[in-house]
Image (cartoon, grey):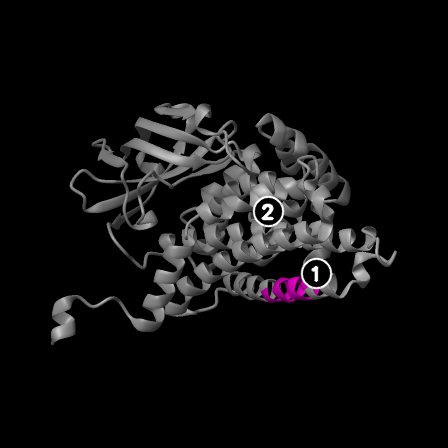
Protein backbone atom coordinates (compact mmCIF):
# COMPACT_ATOMS: atom_id res chain seq x y z
CA UNK A 1 0.00 0.00 0.00
CA UNK A 2 2.94 2.32 0.72
CA UNK A 3 5.92 2.74 -1.55
CA UNK A 4 9.55 2.98 -0.49
CA UNK A 5 12.81 3.88 -2.17
CA UNK A 6 13.79 0.21 -2.02
CA UNK A 7 10.82 -1.44 -3.71
CA UNK A 8 12.59 -2.39 -6.93
CA UNK A 9 15.61 -4.07 -5.35
CA UNK A 10 13.42 -5.85 -2.79
CA UNK A 11 11.07 -7.21 -5.45
CA UNK A 12 14.02 -8.79 -7.26
CA UNK A 13 14.67 -10.94 -4.16
CA UNK A 14 11.26 -11.25 -2.50
CA UNK A 15 9.36 -11.85 -5.71
CA UNK A 16 5.58 -11.79 -5.82
CA UNK A 17 5.61 -15.53 -6.50
CA UNK A 18 7.87 -16.30 -3.53
CA UNK A 19 5.73 -14.23 -1.18
CA UNK A 20 2.52 -15.86 -2.40
CA UNK A 21 3.95 -19.31 -1.80
CA UNK A 22 4.82 -18.29 1.77
CA UNK A 23 1.31 -16.89 2.22
CA UNK A 24 -0.27 -20.12 0.95
CA UNK A 25 1.75 -22.27 3.34
CA UNK A 26 1.21 -20.09 6.41
CA UNK A 27 -2.25 -21.43 7.46
CA UNK A 28 -1.10 -25.04 7.47
CA UNK A 29 1.99 -24.29 9.58
CA UNK A 30 -0.24 -22.41 12.01
CA UNK A 31 -2.72 -25.32 12.18
CA UNK A 32 -0.03 -27.96 12.58
CA UNK A 33 2.30 -25.93 14.83
CA UNK A 34 5.20 -26.68 12.48
CA UNK A 35 8.24 -24.83 11.21
CA UNK A 36 8.16 -23.35 7.66
CA UNK A 37 11.17 -25.21 6.28
CA UNK A 38 10.18 -24.51 2.67
CA UNK A 39 9.88 -20.78 3.32
CA UNK A 40 13.33 -20.69 4.88
CA UNK A 41 14.87 -22.69 2.05
CA UNK A 42 13.39 -20.38 -0.58
CA UNK A 43 14.51 -17.26 1.27
CA UNK A 44 17.99 -18.69 1.63
CA UNK A 45 18.23 -19.57 -2.07
CA UNK A 46 17.12 -16.03 -2.91
CA UNK A 47 20.01 -14.64 -0.85
CA UNK A 48 17.70 -12.97 1.64
CA UNK A 49 19.40 -14.42 4.73
CA UNK A 50 22.63 -12.66 3.74
CA UNK A 51 20.94 -9.35 2.94
CA UNK A 52 23.16 -7.34 5.30
CA UNK A 53 26.44 -8.77 3.99
CA UNK A 54 28.46 -6.70 1.54
CA UNK A 55 28.42 -7.66 -2.13
CA UNK A 56 32.11 -8.61 -2.01
CA UNK A 57 31.20 -11.08 0.74
CA UNK A 58 28.45 -12.55 -1.43
CA UNK A 59 25.56 -10.66 0.17
CA UNK A 60 23.00 -8.12 -1.01
CA UNK A 61 24.68 -5.13 0.71
CA UNK A 62 21.39 -3.89 2.15
CA UNK A 63 21.21 -1.50 5.07
CA UNK A 64 18.58 -1.41 7.80
CA UNK A 65 16.17 0.75 5.84
CA UNK A 66 16.02 -1.77 2.98
CA UNK A 67 15.84 -4.84 5.23
CA UNK A 68 13.08 -3.22 7.28
CA UNK A 69 11.01 -2.54 4.16
CA UNK A 70 11.59 -6.13 3.02
CA UNK A 71 10.53 -7.56 6.38
CA UNK A 72 7.29 -5.60 6.12
CA UNK A 73 6.56 -7.36 2.84
CA UNK A 74 7.42 -10.79 4.18
CA UNK A 75 5.36 -10.24 7.34
CA UNK A 76 2.36 -9.15 5.29
CA UNK A 77 2.54 -12.53 3.55
CA UNK A 78 3.59 -14.84 6.40
CA UNK A 79 3.98 -13.16 9.81
CA UNK A 80 5.47 -16.12 11.66
CA UNK A 81 8.01 -16.79 8.91
CA UNK A 82 9.06 -13.13 9.04
CA UNK A 83 9.34 -13.16 12.83
CA UNK A 84 11.44 -16.33 12.79
CA UNK A 85 13.78 -15.01 10.10
CA UNK A 86 13.94 -11.77 12.06
CA UNK A 87 16.11 -13.37 14.72
CA UNK A 88 18.72 -14.38 12.16
CA UNK A 89 18.58 -10.92 10.64
CA UNK A 90 18.94 -9.30 14.07
CA UNK A 91 22.47 -10.66 14.52
CA UNK A 92 23.34 -9.78 10.94
CA UNK A 93 21.94 -6.31 11.57
CA UNK A 94 24.11 -5.91 14.67
CA UNK A 95 27.18 -6.87 12.65
CA UNK A 96 26.29 -4.32 9.95
CA UNK A 97 25.49 -1.55 12.45
CA UNK A 98 28.86 -2.03 14.16
CA UNK A 99 30.72 -2.21 10.84
CA UNK A 100 29.11 1.02 9.65
CA UNK A 101 30.48 2.64 12.82
CA UNK A 102 34.00 1.31 12.37
CA UNK A 103 33.80 -1.93 14.41
CA UNK A 104 34.28 -5.00 12.21
CA UNK A 105 34.53 -7.53 15.05
CA UNK A 106 31.32 -9.31 13.98
CA UNK A 107 32.11 -9.63 10.30
CA UNK A 108 32.29 -13.39 10.73
CA UNK A 109 28.51 -13.39 11.29
CA UNK A 110 27.93 -11.84 7.88
CA UNK A 111 30.43 -14.15 6.17
CA UNK A 112 28.99 -17.28 7.76
CA UNK A 113 25.46 -16.23 6.87
CA UNK A 114 26.53 -16.10 3.23
CA UNK A 115 27.83 -19.66 3.65
CA UNK A 116 24.43 -20.81 4.92
CA UNK A 117 24.74 -20.69 8.71
CA UNK A 118 21.54 -19.77 10.57
CA UNK A 119 21.88 -17.47 13.58
CA UNK A 120 19.32 -17.45 16.38
CA UNK A 121 18.79 -15.03 19.24
CA UNK A 122 19.35 -16.58 22.68
CA UNK A 123 18.95 -13.55 24.92
CA UNK A 124 15.53 -13.66 26.64
CA UNK A 125 15.38 -15.44 30.00
CA UNK A 126 12.47 -16.28 32.31
CA UNK A 127 12.19 -13.67 35.04
CA UNK A 128 14.91 -11.36 33.70
CA UNK A 129 13.35 -7.89 33.47
CA UNK A 130 16.75 -6.23 32.93
CA UNK A 131 17.05 -7.74 29.43
CA UNK A 132 20.60 -6.90 28.24
CA UNK A 133 21.78 -5.34 31.50
CA UNK A 134 21.72 -8.50 33.59
CA UNK A 135 21.54 -12.25 33.08
CA UNK A 136 20.36 -15.29 34.98
CA UNK A 137 22.63 -17.51 32.91
CA UNK A 138 26.06 -18.27 34.38
CA UNK A 139 29.13 -17.70 32.21
CA UNK A 140 32.08 -19.55 33.73
CA UNK A 141 35.66 -18.98 32.46
CA UNK A 142 37.17 -22.15 30.99
CA UNK A 143 40.78 -21.08 31.62
CA UNK A 144 41.54 -20.64 27.92
CA UNK A 145 39.73 -17.36 27.24
CA UNK A 146 36.42 -19.06 26.50
CA UNK A 147 33.37 -19.61 28.71
CA UNK A 148 30.81 -22.28 29.47
CA UNK A 149 27.20 -21.13 29.74
CA UNK A 150 24.54 -22.69 31.97
CA UNK A 151 20.97 -21.42 32.12
CA UNK A 152 17.68 -21.24 30.23
CA UNK A 153 16.78 -19.06 27.26
CA UNK A 154 13.19 -18.62 26.16
CA UNK A 155 11.51 -17.67 22.86
CA UNK A 156 14.41 -19.08 20.84
CA UNK A 157 12.93 -18.68 17.35
CA UNK A 158 14.33 -20.89 14.59
CA UNK A 159 14.86 -23.65 17.17
CA UNK A 160 14.66 -26.55 14.69
CA UNK A 161 17.20 -25.08 12.28
CA UNK A 162 19.68 -22.71 13.90
CA UNK A 163 23.35 -23.56 13.63
CA UNK A 164 24.66 -20.58 15.62
CA UNK A 165 23.13 -19.13 18.79
CA UNK A 166 24.04 -15.67 20.08
CA UNK A 167 23.92 -15.87 23.88
CA UNK A 168 25.06 -14.05 26.98
CA UNK A 169 25.52 -14.78 30.67
CA UNK A 170 26.97 -13.31 33.86
CA UNK A 171 30.27 -14.31 35.42
CA UNK A 172 30.09 -16.10 38.79
CA UNK A 173 31.33 -12.98 40.60
CA UNK A 174 28.46 -10.99 39.09
CA UNK A 175 30.76 -8.33 37.66
CA UNK A 176 30.64 -8.96 33.93
CA UNK A 177 28.23 -9.89 31.18
CA UNK A 178 29.80 -12.14 28.57
CA UNK A 179 28.41 -12.37 25.03
CA UNK A 180 29.33 -15.14 22.63
CA UNK A 181 28.24 -17.07 19.55
CA UNK A 182 27.60 -20.73 20.27
CA UNK A 183 28.05 -23.44 17.64
CA UNK A 184 25.21 -25.98 17.82
CA UNK A 185 27.63 -28.80 17.07
CA UNK A 186 29.56 -27.94 20.25
CA UNK A 187 26.81 -29.51 22.31
CA UNK A 188 25.55 -28.43 25.71
CA UNK A 189 22.13 -27.34 24.42
CA UNK A 190 18.70 -28.94 24.66
CA UNK A 191 15.58 -27.56 23.00
CA UNK A 192 12.16 -28.19 24.49
CA UNK A 193 9.47 -28.46 21.77
CA UNK A 194 6.78 -28.94 24.43
CA UNK A 195 7.34 -25.32 25.48
CA UNK A 196 5.89 -24.04 22.19
CA UNK A 197 2.14 -24.49 21.72
CA UNK A 198 1.10 -20.86 21.63
CA UNK A 199 -1.86 -18.70 20.68
CA UNK A 200 -0.13 -17.10 17.70
CA UNK A 201 3.15 -16.90 15.78
CA UNK A 202 3.17 -20.66 16.04
CA UNK A 203 5.39 -21.39 13.03
CA UNK A 204 8.33 -19.55 14.62
CA UNK A 205 8.92 -22.67 16.77
CA UNK A 206 10.48 -20.55 19.50
CA UNK A 207 11.37 -23.29 21.97
CA UNK A 208 12.91 -22.82 25.37
CA UNK A 209 16.62 -23.67 25.13
CA UNK A 210 18.52 -25.09 28.07
CA UNK A 211 22.25 -24.51 28.22
CA UNK A 212 24.31 -26.98 30.24
CA UNK A 213 27.96 -25.95 30.27
CA UNK A 214 27.66 -25.00 26.61
CA UNK A 215 31.17 -24.19 25.43
CA UNK A 216 32.01 -20.99 23.57
CA UNK A 217 35.72 -20.76 22.70
CA UNK A 218 37.74 -17.58 23.10
CA UNK A 219 37.52 -16.65 19.42
CA UNK A 220 33.71 -16.63 19.61
CA UNK A 221 33.46 -14.46 22.71
CA UNK A 222 32.37 -11.14 21.26
CA UNK A 223 32.09 -8.90 24.35
CA UNK A 224 32.77 -8.67 28.05
CA UNK A 225 30.75 -5.78 29.48
CA UNK A 226 30.30 -4.62 33.09
CA UNK A 227 26.92 -5.74 34.42
CA UNK A 228 24.26 -3.03 34.48
CA UNK A 229 23.36 -0.21 32.08
CA UNK A 230 26.17 0.62 29.67
CA UNK A 231 26.98 2.49 26.49
CA UNK A 232 28.82 -0.30 24.70
CA UNK A 233 28.41 -0.40 20.95
CA UNK A 234 27.21 -4.01 21.04
CA UNK A 235 24.41 -3.08 23.44
CA UNK A 236 23.32 -0.29 21.11
CA UNK A 237 23.57 -2.56 18.09
CA UNK A 238 21.38 -5.26 19.64
CA UNK A 239 18.74 -2.80 20.82
CA UNK A 240 18.71 -0.98 17.47
CA UNK A 241 18.55 -4.12 15.34
CA UNK A 242 16.10 -6.05 17.52
CA UNK A 243 13.60 -3.28 18.22
CA UNK A 244 13.61 -1.99 14.65
CA UNK A 245 13.20 -5.37 12.99
CA UNK A 246 10.47 -6.36 15.45
CA UNK A 247 8.72 -3.10 14.58
CA UNK A 248 9.08 -3.94 10.89
CA UNK A 249 7.32 -7.29 11.28
CA UNK A 250 4.35 -5.79 13.12
CA UNK A 251 4.18 -2.91 10.67
CA UNK A 252 3.90 -5.54 7.94
CA UNK A 253 0.96 -7.10 9.77
CA UNK A 254 -0.60 -3.63 10.07
CA UNK A 255 -0.12 -3.13 6.32
CA UNK A 256 -1.83 -6.41 5.54
CA UNK A 257 -4.72 -5.79 7.94
CA UNK A 258 -5.48 -2.44 6.30
CA UNK A 259 -5.35 -4.09 2.88
CA UNK A 260 -7.85 -6.75 4.00
CA UNK A 261 -10.08 -4.08 5.51
CA UNK A 262 -10.16 -2.11 2.27
CA UNK A 263 -10.93 -5.27 0.28
CA UNK A 264 -13.65 -6.17 2.76
CA UNK A 265 -15.22 -2.72 2.51
CA UNK A 266 -15.43 -3.07 -1.28
CA UNK A 267 -16.87 -6.59 -1.22
CA UNK A 268 -19.33 -6.38 1.67
CA UNK A 269 -22.81 -5.07 0.81
CA UNK A 270 -25.18 -3.16 3.10
CA UNK A 271 -28.57 -4.88 2.85
CA UNK A 272 -30.39 -1.64 3.70
CA UNK A 273 -29.00 0.27 0.73
CA UNK A 274 -27.56 -2.36 -1.59
CA UNK A 275 -24.31 -0.37 -1.67
CA UNK A 276 -20.81 -1.49 -0.71
CA UNK A 277 -19.58 -0.83 2.82
CA UNK A 278 -16.95 1.41 1.24
CA UNK A 279 -19.77 3.92 0.71
CA UNK A 280 -20.96 3.71 4.33
CA UNK A 281 -19.99 6.81 6.42
CA UNK A 282 -19.14 4.75 9.51
CA UNK A 283 -16.88 2.41 7.55
CA UNK A 284 -15.22 5.33 5.78
CA UNK A 285 -14.56 7.00 9.13
CA UNK A 286 -12.99 3.82 10.49
CA UNK A 287 -10.76 3.37 7.46
CA UNK A 288 -9.85 7.05 7.41
CA UNK A 289 -8.63 6.73 10.99
CA UNK A 290 -6.82 3.49 10.15
CA UNK A 291 -5.04 5.18 7.25
CA UNK A 292 -4.00 8.04 9.52
CA UNK A 293 -2.39 5.50 11.85
CA UNK A 294 -0.75 3.70 8.93
CA UNK A 295 0.84 6.80 7.46
CA UNK A 296 2.09 7.92 10.87
CA UNK A 297 3.69 4.54 11.59
CA UNK A 298 5.22 4.39 8.12
CA UNK A 299 6.84 7.80 8.68
CA UNK A 300 8.12 6.80 12.13
CA UNK A 301 9.67 3.52 11.00
CA UNK A 302 11.13 5.01 7.83
CA UNK A 303 12.82 7.80 9.76
CA UNK A 304 14.38 5.47 12.34
CA UNK A 305 15.62 2.90 9.83
CA UNK A 306 17.16 5.62 7.68
CA UNK A 307 18.88 7.02 10.78
CA UNK A 308 20.35 3.60 11.56
CA UNK A 309 21.47 3.10 7.96
CA UNK A 310 23.21 6.48 7.87
CA UNK A 311 24.73 6.19 11.38
CA UNK A 312 22.91 9.30 12.57
CA UNK A 313 24.07 10.62 15.95
CA UNK A 314 20.95 10.95 18.08
CA UNK A 315 22.90 10.48 21.30
CA UNK A 316 20.64 10.02 24.33
CA UNK A 317 17.54 10.13 22.10
CA UNK A 318 18.34 6.82 20.43
CA UNK A 319 16.87 4.43 22.94
CA UNK A 320 13.62 6.38 23.49
CA UNK A 321 13.16 6.60 19.71
CA UNK A 322 13.79 2.87 19.23
CA UNK A 323 11.44 1.90 22.05
CA UNK A 324 8.77 4.25 20.71
CA UNK A 325 9.01 2.77 17.22
CA UNK A 326 8.56 -0.80 18.45
CA UNK A 327 5.73 0.16 20.82
CA UNK A 328 3.84 2.14 18.19
CA UNK A 329 4.23 -0.64 15.62
CA UNK A 330 2.65 -3.20 17.92
CA UNK A 331 -0.11 -0.83 19.03
CA UNK A 332 -1.01 0.17 15.49
CA UNK A 333 -0.87 -3.41 14.22
CA UNK A 334 -3.34 -4.51 16.89
CA UNK A 335 -5.60 -1.55 16.14
CA UNK A 336 -5.49 -2.22 12.40
CA UNK A 337 -6.41 -5.87 12.87
CA UNK A 338 -9.28 -4.89 15.17
CA UNK A 339 -10.52 -2.37 12.62
CA UNK A 340 -10.28 -4.93 9.82
CA UNK A 341 -12.35 -7.33 11.92
CA UNK A 342 -15.05 -4.68 12.30
CA UNK A 343 -15.10 -3.90 8.59
CA UNK A 344 -14.92 -7.46 7.29
CA UNK A 345 -17.53 -8.68 9.77
CA UNK A 346 -18.30 -12.18 11.01
CA UNK A 347 -16.40 -13.95 8.23
CA UNK A 348 -13.18 -12.61 9.73
CA UNK A 349 -13.98 -14.49 12.94
CA UNK A 350 -13.89 -17.81 11.11
CA UNK A 351 -10.65 -19.58 11.93
CA UNK A 352 -10.00 -20.21 8.22
CA UNK A 353 -10.02 -16.50 7.44
CA UNK A 354 -6.62 -14.85 7.27
CA UNK A 355 -7.75 -12.16 9.71
CA UNK A 356 -8.40 -14.76 12.38
CA UNK A 357 -4.74 -15.79 12.23
CA UNK A 358 -3.51 -12.20 12.12
CA UNK A 359 -5.66 -11.47 15.18
CA UNK A 360 -3.76 -14.14 17.10
CA UNK A 361 -0.33 -13.45 15.63
CA UNK A 362 -0.42 -9.76 16.45
CA UNK A 363 -0.99 -10.44 20.16
CA UNK A 364 2.57 -11.75 20.41
CA UNK A 365 3.87 -8.20 19.94
CA UNK A 366 3.33 -7.29 23.57
CA UNK A 367 5.68 -10.03 24.75
CA UNK A 368 8.76 -8.81 22.88
CA UNK A 369 10.99 -6.42 24.82
CA UNK A 370 10.38 -3.62 25.43
CA UNK A 371 6.80 -4.14 26.59
CA UNK A 372 4.31 -1.32 27.19
CA UNK A 373 5.15 -0.81 30.87
CA UNK A 374 8.89 -0.84 30.23
CA UNK A 375 8.48 1.58 27.32
CA UNK A 376 6.57 4.09 29.40
CA UNK A 377 9.17 3.90 32.18
CA UNK A 378 11.95 4.49 29.66
CA UNK A 379 10.21 7.47 28.12
CA UNK A 380 9.26 8.97 31.50
CA UNK A 381 12.90 8.74 32.60
CA UNK A 382 13.99 10.39 29.35
CA UNK A 383 11.82 13.48 29.91
CA UNK A 384 11.65 13.61 33.72
CA UNK A 385 14.96 12.12 34.77
CA UNK A 386 15.36 9.11 37.06
CA UNK A 387 13.12 8.54 40.06
CA UNK A 388 14.32 10.34 43.15
CA UNK A 389 14.51 8.48 46.44
CA UNK A 390 13.03 9.85 49.68
CA UNK A 391 16.31 11.48 50.72
CA UNK A 392 16.43 13.41 47.44
CA UNK A 393 12.84 14.60 47.91
CA UNK A 394 13.60 15.93 51.39
CA UNK A 395 16.79 17.75 50.48
Q: Which quadrant of the figure contains the N terminus? A: bottom right
> Quick one: label 1 or label 2, which is nearer the N terminus?
1
Was residue 290 drawn as part of the magenta stretch in this picture?
yes
- List the residue tagged with mark 1: 2
Proximity of marks 1 and 2: CB atoms separated by less than 8 Å? no
State whether residue 85 appears in this view.
yes
Residue neighbourhood size for the residue with mark 1, other residues' Cα within 10 Å, grouped as few (<14), some (14–19), many (≥20): few
Q: Which quadrant of the figure contains the C terminus? A: bottom left
Nearest to the eye among marks 1 and 2: give it.
1
In the image, residue 249 above or below residue 287 = above
Percent from the top left, x then y, of residue 315? 39, 69
Q: Secondary structure at mark 2?
A: loop
In the image, residue 267 above or below residue 28 = below
The residue lying toward the viewer, choosing from 366 and 267, is 267
Mark 1 vs mark 2, CA separation in Å: 22 Å
- List the residue tagged with mark 2: 51
Q: Residue at x 51, y 50 (%)?
A: 246
What predominant SS class does the magenta segment belong to? helix
Was residue 362 drawn as part of the magenta stretch in this picture?
no
Percent from the top left, x then y, of residue 298? 61, 63
Q: Quadrant of residue 156?
A: top left
Range of the magenta residues?
Answer: 286-296
The residue lying toward the viewer, choosing from 144 and 168, is 168
Q: Secondary structure at mark 1?
A: loop
Percent from the top left, x then y, of residue 74? 65, 45
Q: Quadrant of residue 346?
A: top right
Amino acid sequence: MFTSDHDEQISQVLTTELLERCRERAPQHDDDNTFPHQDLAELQRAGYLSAFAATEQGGLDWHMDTVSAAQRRLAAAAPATALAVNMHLVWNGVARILADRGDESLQFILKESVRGEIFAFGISEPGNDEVLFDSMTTATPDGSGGYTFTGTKIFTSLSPVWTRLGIFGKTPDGDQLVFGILDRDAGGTAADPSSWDMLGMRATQSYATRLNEAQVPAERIIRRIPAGPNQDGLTFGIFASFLTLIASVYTGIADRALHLAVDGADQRILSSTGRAFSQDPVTRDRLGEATLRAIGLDAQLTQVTHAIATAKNWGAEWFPRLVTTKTLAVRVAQQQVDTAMQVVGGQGFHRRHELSRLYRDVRAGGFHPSNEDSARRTLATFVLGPLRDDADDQS
